[in-house]
Image: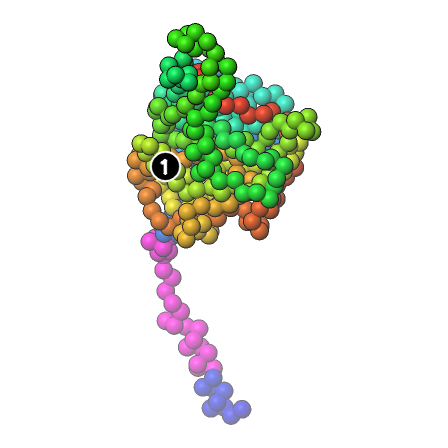
C-alpha cells in the first residue's frame, strides 16, 4: 500500500472516531416509554389466585365475582369493619387482587373450609358466598321464581314466590356423551308446566291432577345457569358426570329482558378428580380471559363473530348479564375476541390437573333465603 493510500485511510479512521461524527446522546422518549408502559399494564392487567391445594373451585368463583363490576363495587362501598364477615375479607382480597396475585386463606377460613386438598363443588360455594355477604351486595345475582299450582278445575291450591341464585338445568341422558345439549332449549324447558297426580284441592274436596307453572317473577341483573353435570345414576347406584357437549348461546331472552354471556366456569376431568377454571369477558373489554389459578391468559379467536353459540364439554356455570345493566352499557361491542369452546376438537375434554373431588347432586333452589380495576 502506498504512503498516500495509508495516509488517506488513517485520516478517514480519525474522522469517523472524532466527537463531531458521534451522534449526540439523547434522553429517552417519554412518550414512547409511556405508551410501552400502558401496553405492559394492559398485558398484566389481571392477576391470578394461588391454589392452596385443590381450591380451584373457589378461585374460579372468586374471579367471576371480582370481575363482576357491580358486585365488586358493592363489596367495596358496603363493607364494615367486622373481621368476622365475608364482606370484610372479600374487600381485602379484591383490593390486593387489583395489583398482584394473592392467596385465599382468609376466604377459606370464613367459609369454614379446613381441608384444602379436598376438591368441592364450585356452584355450591358460589351460593355459599352470596348467602353470607350483605344482601345489598348480592342482590344483582338474586332473582325470584313463582310456582303456582292449579287443580284440574282451575283452582289455585298453592302460590309460592321465592328467591334464587342459580337456575339448575337438568341435562338429558347423562350416559350419552355423544349428544349435544342445548342450553337455550333447557332454559325453556325449565319454565314449562308440569302435571302431578293425586294432589288434594280444598275447593274440590278431593285429590285431582294438578298443573304446576313456573315463571320468573323478578329477573336478576346477573342470571346464573347451573348445568347439572353431576347426577345420581340409579342403574349404577352412584353419582356420575355427564360429559356431553353443550351448545351455549351468546344471548338468552326472557319475557321482559335479554341477557348476554360474560362468564363461564368450566370443569374438566372426572367425578373423583378434575379441575376448575373460569373464562370471563370484563365489562369494559371486548376480549375474553382464562383464569386458571395463578395464570391469566387472553383468548384470541372470535366464536360469536360468525355464529350465535359455541360448544363446550366442560361448561358448568354460565353467567349472563342483563343487556340494560351498567356493566353491559360499557361493553356493547361486536369484536368478541374469544374462543370459549374446547380448544381441542369438538366434544373432547380440555386438559387440566387431576385433583381429588367429592361431588353431591345439585338440587333445584328452594324458596329462601361490576372504574376499571
Across the whole image, how many numbered discs are drawn on residues? 1
State the image coordinates of residue 123 (x, y, percent, origin top left).
Answer: 52, 28
Residue ID for mark 1: 253
Residue 327 picture quarter = top left
Q: Residues within 10 Å of mark 1 (few under 14, many from 20)?
A: few
- Along the line of sight, the residue nearer the viewer: 273 or 34: 273
State the image coordinates of residue 111 (x, y, percent, origin top left).
Answer: 53, 20
State the image coordinates of residue 94 (x, y, percent, origin top left).
Answer: 44, 30
The figure's colour scheme reads rainbow
- Along the line of sight, the residue nearer the viewer: 53 or 162: 162
**Is 22 in the magenta?**
yes
Examine the rendered structure and indicate whether residue 150 appears above or below residue 40.
above
- Along the line of sight, the residue nearer the viewer: 166 or 255: 255
The residue located at (61%, 41%) in the rendering is: 177
**Is 57 in the magenta?**
no
Residue 270 picture quarter = top right
Magenta residues (range): 10-34
Amino acid at each position: 500500500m502506498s504512503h498516500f493510500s495509508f495516509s488517506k485511510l488513517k485520516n478517514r479512521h480519525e474522522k469517523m472516531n472524532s466527537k463531531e461524527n458521534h451522534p449526540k446522546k439523547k434522553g429517552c422518549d417519554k412518550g414512547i416509554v409511556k405508551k410501552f408502559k400502558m401496553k405492559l399494564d394492559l398485558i398484566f392487567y389481571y392477576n391470578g389466585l394461588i391454589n392452596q391445594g385443590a381450591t380451584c373451585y373457589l378461585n374460579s368463583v372468586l374471579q367471576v365475582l371480582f370481575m363482576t363490576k357491580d358486585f365488586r363495587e358493592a363489596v367495596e362501598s358496603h363493607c364494615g369493619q367486622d373481621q368476622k364477615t365475608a364482606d370484610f375479607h372479600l374487600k381485602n382480597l379484591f383490593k390486593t387482587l387489583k395489583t398482584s396475585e394473592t392467596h385465599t386463606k382468609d376466604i377459606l377460613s370464613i367459609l369454614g373450609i379446613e381441608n384444602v386438598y379436598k376438591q368441592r363443588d364450585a356452584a355450591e360455594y358460589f351460593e355459599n358466598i352470596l348467602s353470607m355477604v350483605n344482601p345489598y351486595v348480592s342482590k344483582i345475582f338474586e332473582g325470584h321464581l313463582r310456582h303456582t299450582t292449579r287443580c284440574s278445575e282451575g283452582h289455585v291450591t298453592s302460590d309460592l314466590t321465592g328467591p334464587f341464585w342459580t337456575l339448575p338445568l337438568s341435562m338429558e341422558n347423562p350416559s350419552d356423551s355423544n349428544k349435544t345439549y342445548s342450553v337455550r332449549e333447557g332454559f325453556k324447558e325449565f319454565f314449562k308446566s308440569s302435571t302431578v297426580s293425586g294432589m288434594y284441592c280444598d275447593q274440590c274436596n278431593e285429590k285431582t291432577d294438578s298443573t304446576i307453572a313456573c315463571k320468573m317473577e323478578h329477573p336478576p341483573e346477573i342470571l346464573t345457569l347451573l348445568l347439572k353435570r353431576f347426577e345420581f345414576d340409579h342403574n349404577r347406584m352412584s353419582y356420575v358426570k355427564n360429559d356431553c357437549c353443550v351448545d351455549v348461546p351468546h344471548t338468552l331472552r326472557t319475557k321482559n329482558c335479554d341477557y348476554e354471556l360474560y362468564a363461564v366456569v368450566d370443569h374438566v376431568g372426572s367425578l373423583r378428580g378434575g379441575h376448575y377454571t373460569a373464562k370471563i369477558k370484563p365489562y369494559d373489554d371486548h376480549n375474553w380471559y382464562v383464569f386458571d389459578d395463578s395464570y391469566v391468559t387472553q383468548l384470541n379467536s372470535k366464536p360469536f363473530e360468525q355464529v350465535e353459540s359455541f360448544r363446550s364439554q366442560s361448561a358448568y356455570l354460565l353467567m349472563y348479564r342483563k343487556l340494560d345493566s351498567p356493566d353491559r352499557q360499557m361493553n356493547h361491542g361486536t369484536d368478541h375476541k374469544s374462543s370459549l369452546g374446547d380448544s381441542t376438537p369438538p366434544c373432547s375434554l380440555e386438559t387440566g390437573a387431576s385433583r381429588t373431588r367429592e361431588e353431591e347432586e345439585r338440587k333445584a333452589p328452594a324458596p329462601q333465603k361490576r372504574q376499571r380495576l
